[in-house]
Image (cartoon, helix red, strand yellow):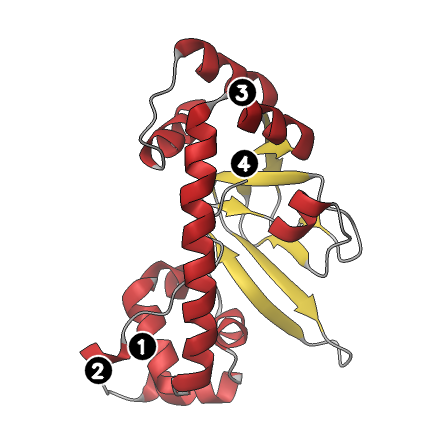
Amino acid sequence: MYNVLIQYIRGHSGVPLTESEIDLIKSVVVFKKFRRRQYFLYEGEVSKYSAFIIKGAMRQYTVDDKGMDRTVNLFLETWWAGDRESFMTGVPSLYFVDAWEDTEALLISRADYLNLYMSIPAIVEMARRLTDVHSFALQKRLNSFITLSAEERYFSLEQTYPEFLQRFPQHIIASYLGISRETLSRIRSHTLKPIEHYGTLPHVCGSHAA
């Protein structure tokens, strides 16, 4: 299970890892299983850990004044899950994060992550690259909500993350796209095919640094 994380770090950094650095990484991450619908983080808590998913799926969401879920992010294997702002700054989270499937993950605390960041050049390079990815994806995602229709957002998601449509139920997909379940049902019932100018709907945090 540790090898998945090590390969991920290598794949997101051009800096090689030494054996002692690999041993240090393995010594600070903690393996944990989550049952389906078990919470990783509650709204109002400080996110003490970031979770690297080995197997399973998680989601990040808010609940509005009417009790409706508003999905912010969806996470699958080899993605970091959690509230990045709360984890990095120590502010209380605005979000819930739970396991949508039975999930296995490697957890790292903020203190241990910062220690790795100060000690291992590959972690620094990974964090830099993924911070850029996060920033660019956030900008593109906001733009898609402003400029794309509901149909275009759905077809973009279908092209970019088809596994979301297989792993998450319709009401979560609708929430993630910012549309109603009825609108999503209507779109799915159509035989229209996506066209190239829809582009891709970026996912903000799927591969963010811990």
Circle 2 packing at 10 Å, graded few (<14), some (14-19), many (20+), is few
State the residue position of label 2.
193
Indicate which label's residue lies in the foreground, 4 or 3: 3
- Disc number placed over residue 79 in the picture, else none: none
Tell me the amino acid under the disc marked 3. Ser
State the residue position of label 1.
155
Relative horizontal placement of residue 210, taking residue 154 as reference (left or right): right
As measured in the structure, the alpha-carbon distance from the residue carrying label 1 to the one carrying label 4 is 30 Å
Indicate which label's residue lies in the foreground, 3 or 2: 3
Tell me the amino acid under the disc marked 2. Lys
Circle 4 packing at 10 Å, graded few (<14), some (14-19), many (20+), is many
- Mark 1 or 4 closer to N-term? 4
Quarter of the image where one finds residue 140:
bottom left
**Whole-percent x, y for residue 192 in the image:** 23, 87
Picture layout, residue 44 above or below residue 14: below
State the residue position of label 4.
105
In the image, 200 versus 52, the foreground residue is 200
Quarter of the image where one finds residue 102:
top right
Residue, far top:
20
As measured in the structure, the alpha-carbon distance from the residue carrying label 1 to the one carrying label 3 is 43 Å
In the image, 37 versus 80, the foreground residue is 80
Q: Are marks 1 and 4 in contact (CB under 8 Å)?
A: no
Picture layout, residue 192 above or below residue 31: below
State the residue position of label 3.
119
